[in-house]
Amino acid sequence: MLPRGRPRALGAAALLLVLILMGFFLFGGDLECERREQGDLGSFPCSLTPRVPPDGDLPADHGGRNRSDCVPLRPLPPKCELLHVAMVCAGHNTSRDVVTLVKSMLFFRKNPLHLHLVTDAVARNILETLFHTWMVPAVRVSFYDAEELKPQVSWIPNKHYSGLYGLMKLVLPGALPPALTRVIVLDTDVTFASDIAELWALFAYFSDEQVIGLVENQSDWYLGNLWRNHRPWPALGRGFNTGVILLRLDRLRQAGWEQMWKLTATEELLTLPATSLADQDIFNAVIKRHPGLVLPLPCIWNVQLSDHTLAERCYSEAADLKVIHWNSPKKLYVKNKHVEFFRNLHLTFLEYNGNLLRRELFGCPSPPPPEAEQLQRALAHLSEEDTCLEFRQQQLTVHRVHITFLPHEPPPPRPHDVTLVAQLSMDRLQMLEALCRHWPGPMSLALYLTDAEAQQFLHFVAASAVLSARQDVAYHVVYREGSLYPINQLRNVAMAQALTPYVFLSDIDLLPSYSLYDYLRASIEQLQLDSGRKAALVVPAFETLHYHFSFPNSKAELLALLDAGSLYTFRSHEWPRGYAPTDYARWREAQAPYHVQWAADYEPHVVVPRDCPRYDPRFVGFGWNRVAHIVELDAQVLTLRMAVRVRMGLLFPAKGAQLRGGGEAHSHLHRARLPPSNRSPGIWRTQSLENVPGPPSILLLRRDFCPWGKSLLLSPLDK
Amino acid sequence: MLPRGRPRALGAAALLLVLILMGFFLFGGDLECERREQGDLGSFPCSLTPRVPPDGDLPADHGGRNRSDCVPLRPLPPKCELLHVAMVCAGHNTSRDVVTLVKSMLFFRKNPLHLHLVTDAVARNILETLFHTWMVPAVRVSFYDAEELKPQVSWIPNKHYSGLYGLMKLVLPGALPPALTRVIVLDTDVTFASDIAELWALFAYFSDEQVIGLVENQSDWYLGNLWRNHRPWPALGRGFNTGVILLRLDRLRQAGWEQMWKLTATEELLTLPATSLADQDIFNAVIKRHPGLVLPLPCIWNVQLSDHTLAERCYSEAADLKVIHWNSPKKLYVKNKHVEFFRNLHLTFLEYNGNLLRRELFGCPSPPPPEAEQLQRALAHLSEEDTCLEFRQQQLTVHRVHITFLPHEPPPPRPHDVTLVAQLSMDRLQMLEALCRHWPGPMSLALYLTDAEAQQFLHFVAASAVLSARQDVAYHVVYREGSLYPINQLRNVAMAQALTPYVFLSDIDLLPSYSLYDYLRASIEQLQLDSGRKAALVVPAFETLHYHFSFPNSKAELLALLDAGSLYTFRSHEWPRGYAPTDYARWREAQAPYHVQWAADYEPHVVVPRDCPRYDPRFVGFGWNRVAHIVELDAQVLTLRMAVRVRMGLLFPAKGAQLRGGGEAHSHLHRARLPPSNRSPGIWRTQSLENVPGPPSILLLRRDFCPWGKSLLLSPLDK
């Protein structure tokens, strides 16, 4: 064995010496770095702070060496220190960007984080749901209302695409809690390629006077020579980019930051018409007047991929990159020599399975959110021997939910409006266009997807003129986890996000008749369902086995197809009990809506008020999920609670439970018991409707899209 | 602005001092480290080399501090230095493991890599194809034949599950090129959580005497007290783990390593029956005799998740982890306090889109493989205005291919054997069980999947008794890239991997009649197709529109179903031209095989010799892909090259190109021209067969699984 321990004391002394020396340099404002060349262990000093030479060139090298030959002697961030990050986020698209940014940050982070999000109502709704269901340990999220902050910046004329929200970074010192002394402020279009703690550690280099850490601009914008009569706001040389900011909030407040920037902005606006780059113009104007406020940061912490960026002078190898800033309006499509590299990094996090980031931040006290802890306990109680283990695990799974994944206009408030509610996975995307053509009204759709599939879904919508044109379809992504399709959880997500007073609880494989939307609204009004009369409208459904099929335009056409054997009543071959109470014979002749009597196993498609009982989320995989819901609706009418419970005990095990998405197939007995109906005290009565003028209200099931059809059908053929 | 540049000279001097001091320590065998505690910038020395105290305990702390309070003052690896990594890999499952390990390595690496792979024939076949199609810049791969090395270790009795292959790490100094002086040797069950250059940099700490860098064992195995009569091989204290090894090959060769370990092994085997842990026992026995050979490495470079591991004493926070070693036979299911964390890290790379690792290693000269460069040029030549741009891009795409993704037994050589060839994506997985029941012979199937889907596929097979039982089905994963289904590229991959003299070119939606496999083999023999007579056997196909359907067991049953309208001849409604030449009327009455005359648009399912012309890979998306192939087969019979070219010009644009997988849907005009038939000079004649005793040779298309059916069908319904 080798002698050990001997050189320790000496090592301690030597390092102490370095640290003292470093401290000396640092307060001088420079970051010291080591040289990084093969076979040469000597050292040389090089500044990582951007200098702004008179000719306006970025400092490419020092003494003939490229900057990237240096690696900063990194200060080590204190273990387990809570890091604070602030972002301004408004709207649907920016909310998606924030998630990707946060994923990249979480992937590399080793510290607990506190996110401070200044949001509009839309982003708050989305991100609150997302973080609540994500349950990442050691991540706290606080929201701040952008609406309240608007008056502080709305007086500033601004031409930047970020609008007022861009300017809000200026008011953070006042908006964030007074006890908060330091914060990293990020634009939503940055991607981390390293641990944010390394960035946080740069706070240690602030001198007593410095309050703002910024990376120099990597474009010629502020040099003012981009085009004739280009008059940028004043800045120190190239100016600084505000995509990544280190703020000493305590000192900013002390220094009267609010007055300082307001005064600067007011004075500059006397000669300049408006800000072009929002907050960045004002930050730069302030810094021009008070250059001592800024600590220039190494450029690798904000590699700016703007058009005609000079960022390449900042890094020369992949190891140099810490934070990528997609600050061109072209985003991922910006022209850049290394854009493929940057794009792959970004795609990594776009597609990254966010569930994997739920990992515990061990080594630091990081209690999971209370819900996560409850969940852990519940999961721990499950027996490995339980034949229903997989079902119980799936029932307990909390899925990450990103509501309104795409821009969405809520429908104007109308008393009889109906939202179509359905759920789907990737293999049913093809239904969306047809559905949009058949249902011109609002829809709320839950999509069960992986993170990567969610990106494919975005491309799918972008490529479809029909889908892109619709702003009244809300898509809610429920992220996949586990092997069983959580059908009722998906339905509940879609139902909870419906914004009209009524919902049509449909399925993705059903195509409404073209006029059903108008017809339902007229019927709701005519039948005075909004007068407190609680009823469910049953919409009769039909199916075809044919691939080439002309959709009927009238009840007469429909009946002719039925008689010709081209159409059948819904599931009449496989499951007549499921639709028998609809009484299709009566429906054929009916001239007016008629009452339908519930019977066991009835599972019609119904229109109900939005606040009707939710689906029982414990139904996962295939079978009885809708039957149970209808039982509950009916039970609340008749208050036959005892009888219902007896019936519930009889729910048969369903063979061949089958996922729709992604091709997982599992055969399981699915036993489920209904809980006592204690969720909604309303009174419900099922009712069918017919004979309001116009075409019949029909649904057609495309049998080739029948959910779980694949497993149901294979067995008879192969037994 | 602040003064800059001033403290540089001073900084240089200080750092130089440290480096000199460090050098002194290092040759003493210790790695120096800094303390990492909040608010305390002092330093203290701590050894990162594992000490083996007399009581056998792992060194948990130093002077009351936990090891993880320290972070080594990392030596910086030389920029762009080529790093060498060796692995031993045998069999299908280990090949998959290697890919995941390599993905984790590539994700964090910043240096060019040269992989040295000692492989059996199976692994070589898989990995050669994989790396060739992966085309990762700055990665070289060399293969070494394990078969040739076997005699050097086969004399050693060994009980470890890795078998002889485990022992092969011992012979690397002789097997690797003499010019290679240093190499990192890895087990295939490790996952990187950091840049391998940091590990490589530890070579700098080898003393003149040291030749092997190893991490101490993190289990009690070598202490010999695990159970009564447990007699492990000799080791220094806890011994060392050989999952991660740094080898100074030059010095090992010089020191007579081969003699050294062979002598040790021979002598130990006089008293010990066999190695329990393969090479690890022998490495440890050698080190016990020559302790000066080993440089103990920091334990974070081989965090061993064996059963009852003591690894927890090695790290206390996530930041400490560099390499995870899944060295329990339970692998991901091992019990461990932090296993969720480790598993998520591993799943990250299992699911990681390997295409993203094709990113250029910029900053280091890393010319892409020549094929990749050609591809880049071809892609650069495409015009953005070209309406067929998407098609041309897809045609040029080189898909990463992982052949025989699952264990596979090649069929024994039989002169008339037939392999069923087909391709599928995730949404057709459900067909596999039925196909296995209908076709008892060998199959070669290409699966178009993402990396994440490939993992789902593994679970799908593991969950199916039917699929798990079959060793004669070869699954080849073609990784998804681009938006159009590369149908003919997939067919070619599956066809190229068929190992029987004949292939049945089928489609995943078709179910063969139960006896078709036997019947085809009998027919090939009877018709003497192996006597140089070139012919394609046309297998007539039928379809049903019914979900509940009893598969016919005889020609009589089939005819009855046809007459009853429960069955149709294949695509008779949509595309009668595609199958008309089969002449079903004649087939009804036929008592013997008859000749079929090719006609335009004919696209039957045929049995042909394995070396028949490949499919034209430029057909992507939907349409004409099979028609073109049949044209080519037929053209080679009639040598009507001119006529064929004329016909080719007439290939109609197909509307509604549609992907099957993952739900992407695109509508495009697909124009394609056939190339001159210059790939295979054989003579081909299409021919149908019938009337060999036994049931009819039929195929049934399950229409609900019709590829592209979704798009074909939606339009008529919605126009």
Image (cartoon, coloured by chain):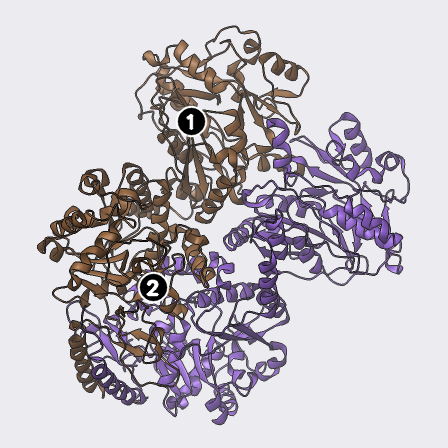
Chain colours: A purple, B brown
Q: Circle 2 sits on which residue?
A: B322
Q: CA distance from mark 2 to mark 1?
A: 43 Å
Rendered position, A381 above or below B692: below
Measuring from the top left, give residue A335's x and y in whole percent. 37, 60
Taking depth in this image into account, of A378 and B14 the one nearest to the observer is A378
Residue type at the position of mark 2:
Lys
Residue type at the position of mark 1:
Pro
Taking depth in this image into account, of A193 and B520 the one nearest to the observer is B520
Q: Secondary structure at mark 1?
A: loop
Taking depth in this image into account, of A232 and A248 the one nearest to the observer is A248
State the image quarter where residue A418 is shown. bottom right
Report whether residue A308 is seen. Answer: yes
Measuring from the top left, give residue B688's x and y in whole percent. 47, 13
Q: Chain of mark 2?
A: B
Rendered position, B88 above or below B18: above
**Where's the C terminus of chain A, which quadrant?**
top right
Neighbor class of circle 2 (other Cα within 10 Å; few <14, some 14-19, many 20+) is many
> Residue at position x 45%, y 45% from top?
B454
> Residue at position x 22%, y 54% from top?
B283
**Where's the N terminus of chain A, which quadrant?**
bottom left
Measuring from the top left, give residue A32's x and y in whole percent. 26, 81
Taking depth in this image into account, of A554 and B342 the one nearest to the observer is B342
